[in-house]
Amino acid sequence: MTVVMRKPAGRAVLVQELVARQSRVARAAKRLFDIVFATLILLVTAPLLAVVAALIWMESGGPVLFRQPRMGHGHRPFVIGKLRTMDSDGRVTRVGRMLRPTGIDELPQLWHVLTGEMSVVGPRPEVLDRVPRWEGELPDYWARHLMRPGITGWAQVNGLRGDVSIPERLHYDLQYLCTWSLRLDAVVLWRTMATVWRDTRLTYWR
């Protein structure tokens, strides 16, 4: 599939200018944090990921990872990977029901952080086939690709996870790009961990 790059319109022009003014030192610090964080978490969780991969294979066979083309930074597509939580019929598996509330199924995306395709914090990468539609309906949508997509983001910690309003999610994504700072990334990461802890407690200890 070919996605045609277009010049951003409307408020996206302002977003593009603000992103261009971001401190190179701050951006380098963000990248350094991404590398250190992803490396540490992957090393610590490697045994857990191995066990979970075995459980997925034993329950439903087939590939352990679910792969899907997504749109990345600068309109460069990439194939994202996450632990598979659904069977061939599109139903959530028993292992999947355990993984989703904890976010463990998202951990393989840390590899994309190491390769530079993603960041720990940023706008969530959209499914590639959906991008032309949203760019056609929302002229400012282009601007959300001005930074690396993230495993978690400002929209997600404000309750916009899963099947949500795309214009509303875009509002938070552009707000993140306009006001980005290392402090904001820290806030997003802290709120993400708090949400995962809450969801894990509700799932396993309610």
Image: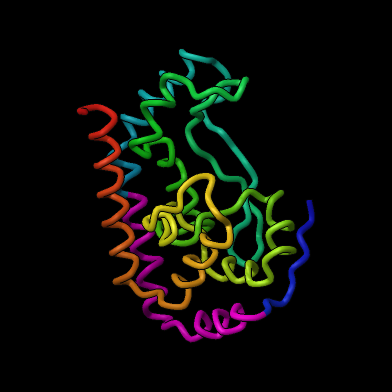
Q: Nearer the viewer, residue 77 or 42?
A: 77
Residue at the location (32% across, 54% down)? 37
Q: What residue lies at 44% left-to-right and 26% top-to-bottom?
A: 96
The residue at 50%/38% (across/down) is 82
**Drawn side of residue 27 relative to residue 204, left or right:** right
- In the depicted structure, whether residue 201 falls above or below residue 155: above
Q: Residue furthest left?
A: 205
Expressed as whole percent of the image width and height from the top left, the position of residue 95 reads 41, 22
Q: In this view, does 16 lie to the left or right of 95?
A: right
Q: Is residue 137 left or right of residue 88?
A: right
**130, above or below 60, in the image:** below
The one nearer the camera, 171 or 97, is: 171
What residue appears at the point 61 percent right and 46 percent down from the top-left corner?
Answer: 79
Left or right: 167, with 179 as reference point: right
Span shown in magenta = 10-39
**Residue situated in front as seen by the camera: 19 or 133:** 133
Magenta segment includes 144 = no
Quadrant including the C terminus = top left
Place of residue 180 in the rendered image (x, y in percent of width and height, measured from the top left): 40, 74
Q: Is the magenta stretch mostly helix, strand or loop?
A: helix
Q: Does the magenta stretch include residue 37?
A: yes
